[in-house]
Image (tube, rainbow, N blue to C red):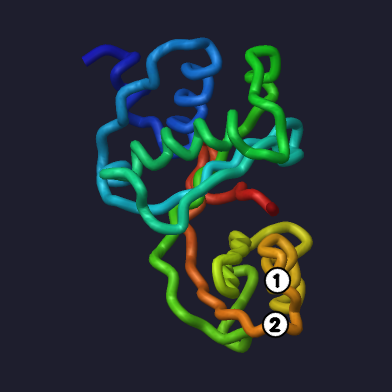
Amino acid sequence: MTAEHDTFRAMGPAEYARECVESMVRRRPTPAAPGGEVFAPRAACFVSIKKLGELRGCVGTLAPAEPDLAHEIARNAASAAFHDPRFHAVGEDELAALTYSVDVLSPSEPATAAELDPSEYGVIVTAGFRRGVLLPDLTGVDTVARQLAIALQKAGISPDEEFAIERFTVKRYHEGTDQSGGCAQ
């Protein structure tokens, strides 16, 4: 086993997201999915990219769309880097300034506002075909009212309309650690 192979085996979800984006930007093949328990299950996830601490891209899925988490990360890393409508595509000149995090979502469950805690649960609000999502434990989102207001605004749902609430938890992976990161919007 080579040292390079050992490094690859120790790669976590956020490091894998980085490898995927850097390979795509440099027009190289997407790296093979890492082995290991964390990458094997089917799971929804969000990939967040920040540049100098500011959001640079964040795209994810609420239900798994790929056969395993590794493929889900690769798909969402590409979308966050190249298809987040709030930002232009990531360029090679900015790769060194980017940091990555991956939020792996639990299945969502119906909830009431009284059952929410923005430090513990992400939220999904739905009215008809409109849906807004907000990840948990975000800077500046300290109350349920603020969490719901942001999610409703993202969905284009008036607070006066009837809407359904779902909640979910995340396992957050940041480069070099198991926890920290995430995207606000």
Which amino acid type corresponds to the residue marked 1 in the rendered image?
A: Ile
Name the residue located 59 percent from the left edge and 60 percent from the top edge. 135
User: Which of the 4 image quadrants contains residue 6?
Assistant: top left
Q: Position of residue 157 (x, y in %)?
A: 70, 71
- 2 relative position to 185: left or right: left
Name the residue located 26 percent from the left edge and 12 percent from the top edge. 2
Q: Judging from the image, what secondary structure is the residue with disc 1 in?
A: loop
Q: Does residue 121 show up? A: no
Name the residue located 51 percent from the left edge and 75 percent from the top edge. 166
Which amino acid type corresponds to the residue marked 2 in the rendered image?
A: Glu
In depth, the one of 62 and 17 nearer the eye is 62
Q: Residue furthest left?
A: 1
Name the disc covering residue 161, or none.
2
Q: Does residue 128 show up? A: yes
Name the disc covering residue 27, or none.
none
Name the residue located 72 percent from the left edge and 40 percent from the top edge. 86
- 56 relative position to 23: left or right: right
Q: Position of residue 162 (x, y in %)?
A: 64, 84
Q: Badge 1 is on which residue?
A: 157
Contact between labelled residues 1 and 2, with CB atoms less than 8 Å apart: yes
